[in-house]
Image (cartoon, grey):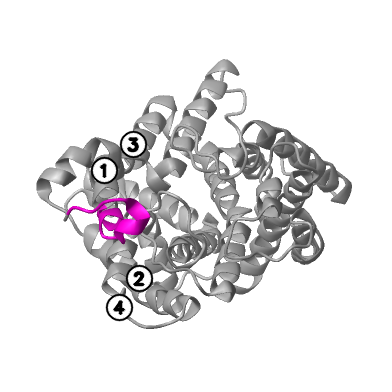
Amino acid sequence: MTQIGMQSAERTTAIAAKKERAGRLFYIDNIRSALIILVVLHHVALVYGASIEGYYYVEPPFTDPLAFQALLIFALVNQAWFMGAFFLFAGYFTPGSFDRKGVGPFLRDRLIRLGIPMLVFYFILSPISFLGYFLMPAQLTGITEPLTWQMFWQAYPDLVGLGPLWFVAMLLIFDFGYAAWRAVTANRTSSPAAKSSVPGYLSLAIFVLLLAGISYVMRIVVPLGTTVLEFPTLAYLPQYLTFFIVGIVAARRDWLRTLPNAMGVVGFAMAIVAIVVLFPLAFSGEIFSLEVTPALDNAMGNGHWQSAAYALWDSIFAIGMIMGLIVFFRRFIAGAGSFGRFLSQQSYTVYIIHIPIIVFVVYALRDVALGGLLKFGLASIIVLPLCFAAAYLIRKLPYATRVL
């Protein structure tokens, strides 16, 4: 190639890169970073109050009703929307990635970026995280023998698992489904659709009701809190799938850029009204105690009317929160500053590695005499910087950025 040709190619590459940077929605990167932080806090909360059976490590005894109630509500509110938001944004970036790469490279990239981390967590990080289970008091686990390598390797087949990487596994299924759909439709959707106005409030209301109704029916079969094939929140499958599809449509019609600011305000208002009115109604107005009450169990599914109220609540709340956050970040946190870029670059790695870091930090703090909420705060302050620092170092390893 001549020098002139090389210079021309370099200019073309530079122009393309500049256009890509100009078109990048940095506020979506910032939202996803905030969501990753929320995921880490969510899992710290499970240690100090909002405990679930079989979690990697919990710190007993739960004798503080305020901590139990606050952290349980925190966990339930998070679960109502934050993973759905991840699927929506994943769907939003899927068509462009598929169009640029084509079916083969697209699927190969998904297998590398999603499949490899999933396998690493399944066979390595999950067993390491479950070391915390052996370190819990014997009255909780029934394990009376000291932890040895022999015991660990005997238990190893029971310690492997998807953990939080269930999201990656489900997203990989969705991506393969999208590729199959594009193949069936002969790539008729390969060119972007013309911009269209964002659906109005009537369409939004219909969508909310349909999602709530389908979720209610789904939870008759799979109540909330039921793990199926290592997917701990399969009851939210209607939300995850529909949000992924909405993300695809939003990308084609440029809805994230054109969502009116007023709809963001309405979204936040919807979320507030839902949590003030429908959330207590779903639990028959009962306040949580240190025990799992029948009101809590009824809200989780099995056809109870409380489950219908809960499904309506989390559908309204999820849609409202996401609309509100898109507008809020687009208006106020839309920049690409160095700190924001740092958080965005490490976020995916943080999602993969945060569980074992949480386990070992909270175990190290086990003798600190603080109440549940204060200890949750202390652990969070330590865990978050550690996660991002560890992610930064991991991404410095050779070839790591190809995956992460």
Please give left or right for residue 325 compared with residue 358 in the image.
right
Q: Which residue is drawn at 62% across and 74% down?
A: 332
Q: Does the magenta stretch include residue 143?
A: yes
The residue to which callout 4 is attached is 367
* Residue type at numbered disc 1: Val
- Percent of width and height locating residue 55: 40, 52
- What is the C-alpha distance between the residues marked 4 and 3? 38 Å
The reply to whether dot 4 and dot 3 touch (C-beta < 8 Å) is no
Name the N-terminal-most of marks 4 and 3: 3
- Quadrant in the picture for residue 266: bottom right
Is 148 drawn above or below residue 264 in the view shown?
above
- Percent of width and height locating residue 233: 54, 43
- What is the C-alpha distance between the residues marked 2 and 4? 17 Å
The residue to which callout 2 is attached is 383
- The nearer-to-camera label among 2 and 4 is 4
Secondary structure under badge 2?
helix
